[in-house]
Image (cartoon, grey):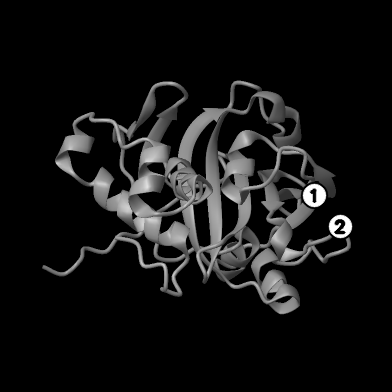
């Protein structure tokens, strides 16, 4: 199943293999997927390669892993759809004729949680560049709060021009072309971000988690956004495929 002479990275081939497995009825019905060591032996790859592939599938919400128990296909409890087009928030608002501004901007080096470490496949003590932005209307009323974390491979630094649209800056300065994002969207209370967003702590916000990849399907950015529900509607345009 794995072609070691192919130019396609091994972890991408393993990911494709696992996607076929989780699409099988027996695994959809609750049967646990083969263990990491078993998959490594079966496919002739390292356990780290298996882990890269399973981390990605877990981030996309397709599988659930429990230590000491095993890995199984995640239950589908809602609509999951791919988005054909996606932008930076500033670019998207510009196309709609809406002017937004950076109310707050902060760049710092931080240690990160397990979700980000798994996505980037980095060590626990590795410092990651974090960009925080509070965006709002010209009047100063906040709309959304973002946090972005960048893979060390990209080479971003605190001296970059983060006050401009992000993805064009990455392409122009670092040659990084973002190509795909996997997103998780949910609703939650504003909580600790209430003061920043100028709402009550119980106020509902739209939480969006985004895993961004380049044209080589390598991780580039982990991004989370908290949108004020009275200021923003997340719309999806879905086209029916051909028969």
10 Å crowding of disc 1: few (<14), some (14-19), many (20+) = some
Q: Is residue 211 left or right of residue 157?
A: left
Residue 219 sits in which quadrant? bottom right
Above or below residue 31? Residue 108 is below
Residue 243 placement, left or right of 132 = left
Task: Identify whether 18 is placed above or below 157.
Answer: above
Q: Residue at x 68, y 62 (%)?
A: 99
The residue singled out by tag 1 in the image is 103
The residue drawn where x is 84% and y is 47% is: 108
Count numbered badges in the picture.
2
Q: Quadrant of the C terminus?
A: bottom left
Q: Is residue 143 left or right of residue 160?
A: left
Between residue 39 and residue 20, name the one nearer to us. 39
* Residue 82 in view in this figure: no
Residue occupied by mark 2: 158
Say which element carries label 2: loop
Q: Gap in Å between the C-alphas at discs 1 and 2?
A: 18 Å
């Amino acid at each position: 199943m794995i072609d070691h002479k192919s130019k396609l990275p091994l972890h991408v081939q393993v990911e494709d293999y696992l996607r076929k497995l989780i699409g099988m009825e027996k695994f959809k019905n609750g049967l646990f997927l083969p263990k990491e060591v078993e998959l490594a032996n079966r496919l002739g790859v390292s356990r780290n390669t298996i882990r890269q592939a399973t981390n990605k599938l877990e981030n996309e919400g397709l599988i659930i892993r429990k230590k000491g128990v095993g890995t199984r296909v995640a239950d589908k409890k809602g609509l999951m759809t791919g988005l054909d087009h996606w932008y930076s928030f500033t670019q998207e608002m510009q196309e709609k004729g809406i002017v937004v501004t950076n109310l707050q901007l902060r760049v710092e080096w931080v240690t990160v949680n397990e979700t980000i470490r798994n996505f980037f496949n980095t060590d626990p003590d590795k410092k990651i560049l974090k960009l925080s932005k509070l965006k709002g209307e010209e009047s100063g009323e906040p709309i959304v709060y973002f946090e972005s974390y960048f893979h060390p491979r990209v080479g971003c630094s605190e001296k970059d021009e983060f006050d401009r649209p992000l993805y064009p800056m990455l392409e122009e300065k670092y040659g990084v072309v973002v190509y795909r994002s996997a997103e998780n969207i949910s609703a939650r209370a504003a909580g600790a971000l209430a003061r920043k967003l100028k709402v009550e702590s119980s106020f509902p916000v739209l939480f969006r988690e985004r895993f961004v990849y380049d044209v080589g399907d390598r991780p580039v950015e982990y991004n989370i956004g908290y949108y004020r529900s009275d200021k923003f509607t997340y719309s999806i345009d879905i086209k029916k495929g051909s028969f």
